[in-house]
Image (cartoon, coloured by chain):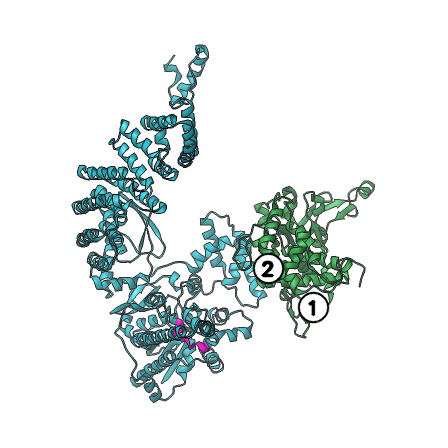
Amino acid sequence: MAIHILGIRHHGPGSARNVKAFLEATKPDIVLVEGPPEADGLLEWANDPGLKPPVAILVYQPDNAQQGAFYPFAEFSPEWQAIQYARNNKIHVRFMDLPAGHQFALEQEKREALRKKAEAMAAAMAAANAGRAAAASDELAPGESEDLYEPKTGNGEFLKEAATGHAPTAATNTPDIPIDEEALVDASPATARAIRRDPISYLAEVAGFEDGEKWWEHMFEHRLGSEQVFDAVSEAMQVLRELVPQPDDQLEACREAWMRKCIRQAEKEMFQNIAVICGAWHAPALQQMPKQKDDNDLLKGLPKVKIDCTWIPWTYDRLGYFSGYGAGIQSPGWYDHVWKYPADDGTRWMAKVAQLFRKQGMDTSVAHVIEAIRLAESLAALRNLSKAGLEELNEATLSVLCGGEKMQMQLIQRELIVSNRMGEVPEAIPKPPLQLDIEKHQKRLRLPATADWKDYTLDLRKDTDLERSILLHRLQLLGIEWGHPQGASGKGTFKEAWRLQWDPELSIQVIEKGNWGNTVAEAAEKYTLDRAAAADSLGTVCELLDMAIPAEVHGATAGLINQISNMAAASGDVIQLMGVIPSLVSVTRYGNVRKTDTELVLGIVDSMITRICVNLPAATTAVNEEAAYQLLDLFFKLNDAVSLLQQDEITRQWQDTLKAISASAHSAPVIRGYATRLLTDHKLLEGDALINAFSYAMSVATPPEVAAAWLEGFLKGSGTLLLLDQALWNLVNNWVASVPKETFTQVLPLLRRTFANFSQPERRKLGEKVRAGGVEQVSPIATSGDIDSERALQGIPVVLQLLGITQNTTV
Amino acid sequence: MSAILRQNAEELFAQELEELQKQDSGKRPANWKLTPAAVVTYLVGGKLKNGFEVTPKYIGNKRLMEIAVATLTTDRALLLYGLPGTAKSWVSEHLAAGISGDSAMIIQGTAGTGEEAIRYGWNYAKLLAEGPSERALVETPMMRGMKDGKIVRIEELTRIGADVQDTLITILSEKTLPVPELNIAVQAVKGFNVIATANNRDKGVNELSSALKRRFNTVILPVPDSIEEEIDIVKRRVTSFEKVMELPAEPPALQEIRRIVTIFRELRNGVTLDGKTKIKVPSGTLSTAEAISVVNSGLAMAAYFGDGQLKATDLAAGILGSVVKDPVQDKLVWQEYLETVVKPREDWKDIYRACREL
């Protein structure tokens, strides 16, 4: 009986190659892979042709979907290769990590403990006097906060196991106590520093490398021959484990105990040749088996939660180190290349780079490529490396192809080194119903989920596009941010622009929102109503309505409208009401593109405008200047909305309100002025009445700032209007002319303040108009004098030629 | 000490080169005095196996030096590119000293540099007396470098007119220098290569043609990353200056250097070191090299006019001179900086007063 422990680096192409070669040589009868045992059932899909890496196993708590973890696999992941080998050769393969159910439960316990500790500390600090508290925080904070807040540094990424679902778990953190999962797994504050250092870096230092990653890469990943490499890894780790101080970590201990338990189980089942694939760090711990009883004691009474798991597509981007995944790698695209072309000396890579540059319109000759490879090779030789790595190739690219400019390297980083790519998952895999429904829609509407963003412009007059839009809006309502609306160019509401980019972590959103319904429509409706019920301000509900109408969740729309009218009745806040009217009105006006049921909306618009009209005059009194200007903006939009509606009843109410405001002495003057103008526009205030109103407002007795504000409101944004509207012009002009000389000097500043807001050309034109005596000066036109017909005739052929008429036909 | 004002790198650091050569057992490219790895060590410094300490010549990213040396092992030439005062010529001198043991093969590029300065010229007396012959030929450093297999340096390549620049193409790609008058061609011996320097700040430079650019690998030398690095550079260079100039003044306190580097960095980056205050940026480059020369001139002032100790007053004139390049705009920038940044700093009172007095 033989047990082979293969210590690997997660997502190391060299490790993957070694594992593959080793398995093919030793032909084990069972393969144990580090991973959650709950996902054993998923392994039957592993060699399904529809499952294309990068993919991940998503492990989550069905009753709390935010608590989840991802176990990503790329084609060059050793684990993936091991699983593939096992499936293809029809031998047993099992996951052997500590079940995620226990891990989650342990983490929850820890988080609870930390929260309590933090609370206790806060309480203690509050109790202490100010000076002491400050000192205490100085003393305590570093240890605590490092552990709690500091983003994790590169602490032995490849030793660290499964990505403990960073982004999703982060969502569960309460805002006041952000807890870093990795840090939690790590250590107590006292040893935090020591642990932060990647243990491998000690070895790297001895070998003269800057960091552990690089050393490992050159030692193990780039090596083509693989004899005894696993023994070497195991021995190295053994030494490190002995020398580097270890944190007393329950979780790590439990995990290793469980792994050993799995190995013992396999032995018990009489497997003769057992291959174990695990992170290099664990290899020594699995080789020297302690007493079975110790392990069992350790694993006794572990807390447990219920776990579900599924395959989800993953992206290289997410695999990347930068997206915060603990066992991440910096260059998935490069690893992919190394995996596919292990013997490449950089030529193929450089050719790829050159191709990319050419595609971007940068001149890159074959000579460039040759020179770059040469430079990379001499760099490797200079650094005593057997082969040019990504670093050497990058430096050569920078120096030869980019002329030293780093800008262009970003292109390579994005396109080649990370190389955003998304995996696929076969349809037959059991998935949450909501996910299935989304996929069904994606397929039907030909909206594939891709890792790179893609822009779509939808024409809502077309059925497919309309359905696409509805789907995207519904997903937005659900908080599944797959599509991001972009500003559509051009006029008309039948166009919508979206930018679509699928993020694997959306999968967890999908699972979470699956609680609300099995189809997108159902879930969107229920979720929206739930959010509306929890909303406390009218604005929030209106926003929801705004989103719900294009999403065509009719049940929710009706509910929202009902809630809005209830809340509007209770709300005294006119401004809030005014804010939502314009968008509602545009829905009713243009709703027919979407065939929305506009009657419903119209009903509430009606009642809301009535409410506004009643309350508005009061709302405009006793407001300060800033608020008045804010209100003025809303006025402007509301007036537009009313004109858009073209409902006599509403228009009449609105006009009455305007009259009331215009006449009220207590309303904010700027609004009063604007209301008066609107009345003029509606032709309700004309002739002498208007002149009277104007002169009254501008009389000397009115405090200057009030008069100025009134005039500003009255002439708001109408410099051009003043030019063109002769009646308005006459009004202002006559008033200015009639002001006595002494008074004029007093009102001059007011006028100036208003006119200063007009644009330069407007003011110039206004000046010209005044000079011309109230008639707008027409730009000079060439007057017709005597025409020299002889000379004119000479031009005719040219004109004809320009018009495309041949000369012969004319003369 | 010799009477030479400034010795060549290979003489100044003769001992280091010798020690390196002794320790250096690896394979050397033809006609190289050192292995590529030893050249890098010579540039960035380090401790040899026998404990001999090599001083760093270039303080900064070692990888850049590796790229530079690796380039020279290939058949591409090296172009050092960067702002004025980022040690381009310094690096090129030491590269040539380390590789060929001779940093004197130099062509200074100017707007007036002609082809005869790059290829060859004629001794007209001989030409008239004897007719065209090799004896009448005046060799340029380029030609000599090709014959001897040495590194040739071209300073300020972009200042040379475009038509003259292009004479380099044949030399760099075919490694020959034809002399049509004599119907011969000088073919480069192994070990020959070219290091050119050029700066990307000055206006009115002649961009390299893409044909020529293709013959060069470019290394951009950046301004120092951190203030500590910059202080280190200034300190080292000033110390070596003192040695050369035999100044009687005391070595400058780190404090003074730190202040000058701080002023230069702040003005260069347009923000105070703590990142709190925005500052207007003057038109000069304010490179590390200028900081070095400010300290140097301050030392000279202190030695000959002061009490031998570097004081703020000795430095003020130098700082002002390097910051204020444009008498109108830069002066305002400087005054603003003086009043808003220098004045409030408690321990900078002396420098503020000294600058105000000017």
Q: Is residue A309 left or right of residue A756?
A: left
Q: Residue furthest right?
A: B129
Near mark 1 (Cα within 10 A), the count class, few <14, some 14-19 or many ≥20, is some
**Viewer-side residue, A588 vs A509:** A588
Q: In which quarter of the image is residue B182?
A: top right
Q: In which quarter of the image is residue B289?
A: bottom right
Q: Which chain is green?
A: B
Identify the hue of chain A.
cyan
Parent chain of label 2: B
Q: In this view, does A188 lie above or below A166?
A: below
Parent chain of label 1: B
Q: In this view, does A563 lie to the left or right of B146?
A: left
Q: How far apart are marks 1 and 2 (CA)?
A: 50 Å
What residue is pinned by disc 1?
B21
Any mark on residue A636, and which?
none
Q: Give the range drawn in magenta.
A: A182-191
